[in-house]
Image (spheres, helix red, strand yellow):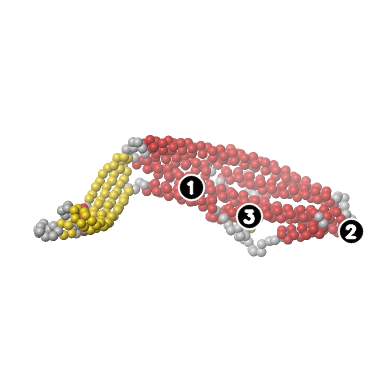
Amino acid sequence: MRKSQITGVILFLFMFANITPAVAQDTWSLKRCVDYALQNNLTVKQQEVQKRLADLTYRQSLLSQVPGANASVFAGYSDGRAPSITDNTYVNQSIFNSNGNLNVGADLFNFFSKRNTIAANRYDAEANSFLLQKARNDLAFNVATAFLQILLNNETVKINENQVSTTRSNLENTKKLVIAGSVPESNQADLEAQLAQDSTSLVTAQNNVTLSILQMKAYLNLGFDIPFLPEVPENVGQLALTPLAEMSPEMVYSAALTSYPQTKSDALKIKSATKAYQSAQGQLYPTLSIGGGLSAGYANNFFERDPLNPTAPPKLVPFGKQLDNTFNKNIGLTLKIPILSGWQQRTTVSKAKINIYSQELQRDLNNQKLRQDIYTAHTNAVAALQKFIASSKGVDAAQKAYDFATKRFNLGLMNTIDYITTQSKLFKAQTEKVSAQYDYIFKMKLLEFYRDQKISL
């Protein structure tokens, strides 16, 4: 590639890399991010809907204890031959009639089936409350993870910017030496190519920041066009972390079993399934219920004769008197005994019993996964700590090698290729150290989250 082409690529990359928003931005702390996400995240809102539905189901089952009451009113018109109420002969007539009914009923025996259904729905509603808590806790952790990723990517940008600045400075010095005839022109070409490569890495690092911010905005349900600037803690490297020696997997797992919302939800789901099984059993027994009703009617063909004047034409019975004459009261008991339908109900009972076992298996699977995740997190934390220690030593060694190489290069005792190689090793070591540091913080925060169901920086 010719010098003019390399210079053009460098200028283009720097023009793209140095673009900054012109609008002033307020900062987002981790607490602000978590609070905003809990209010606006769509996944949490979905879980809130599920909790509300479970609460309504429980409330509905509670109201099923209230005796049932129904009222009805009928009004109709008919025209044609019909029996006369007066003398029971068929005559052509137009009739308007209406009647009203009120019926009340309540269960007397087998009421415990309803009580078990109510208990099952109550446990299910409580289980959904813990599932909502789990969704909120998981969201808080995901937001914290995204926040750390943004900080890591910002640190990577700084390292890349420093690399570009260093390469550019070396290029400027080399240009002077080339003009003076101290070094060959190929040294300048090598550094120009290195500057183009470093600039490309810088643009990639800046793009990673943008992508991690987009991930954060998705958690927050924040408009993608709204500026987002994280509030960087004063010293991420000095964050308070629980010593790894105090975070044994079994200790974390034991603590998680008492605080993990999924575990509490699973226990309540088993109780709910047990009560549903008992409710299904209750349907095998007879049901005794009591019921009663009131009714009255009116018709415009209801005539009567005056007993004091039998020869006079009959007169329509007044509305109030008709209601009084037709007023009816009834009360009775109903005994419902399952016979042929009992086999269908027995299948329902068997399914309910199997559902208890299914819920127990789900609890065991969730606990197994929780334990596996904790052991995996602990193993990763140990590896992350060792990697961070090793990368810290690697940076110290690479820095010494680079300082020594710089002196030799400035004296013309080292060629450009070897010098760029040494510089690249330092850049790689710095990047690995920052990545290892944030990886270790993340792994320890994950263990703390499993133990306490809390996340903070």
The residue at which mark 3 appears reads as 213
Q: How far apart are marks 1 and 3 (CA)?
A: 31 Å
Tell me if 420 is positioned left or right of 217 in this view. Answer: right
Residue type beneath disc 1 = Ser
Whether the residues at callouts 1 and 3 have beta carbons within 8 Å, the answer is no
Quadrant where the N terminus lies?
A: bottom right
Observer able to see residue 92: yes
Mark 1: few, some, or many residues within 10 Å (few <14, many ≥20)? many
Residue type beneath disc 2 = Ala
Q: Nearer the viewer, residue 39 or 323?
A: 323
Residue type beneath disc 3 = Ile
Q: Residue at 82%, 58% (x, y): give it.
A: 3
Q: Closer to the observer: label 1 or label 3?
A: 3
Q: Residue 180 carries which label?
A: 2
Whether the residues at callouts 2 and 1 have beta carbons within 8 Å, the answer is no
Q: Residue at 25%, 51% (x, y): give it.
A: 294
Q: Is mark 1 on a helix, strand or loop?
A: helix
Question: Residue 88 location, x and y as percent?
Answer: 17, 52
Mark 3: few, some, or many residues within 10 Å (few <14, many ≥20)? many
Where is 74 relative to 125, above or below?
below
Q: Distance between the residues labelled 2 and 3?
A: 48 Å
Tell me if 45 is positioned left or right of 18 in this view. Answer: left
Q: What element carries label 3?
A: helix
- Which is more N-terminal, label 3 or label 2? 2
Where is 93 relative to 282, above or below?
below
Question: Residue 402 location, x and y as percent?
Answer: 80, 49
Q: Nearer the viewer, residue 21 or 334?
A: 334
Q: How far apart are marks 2 and 1 (CA)?
A: 77 Å
The residue at which mark 1 appears reads as 129
- Hey, which quadrant is residue 6 in on the image? bottom right
- Which is more N-terminal, label 3 or label 1? 1
Where is 206 relative to 366, above or below?
below
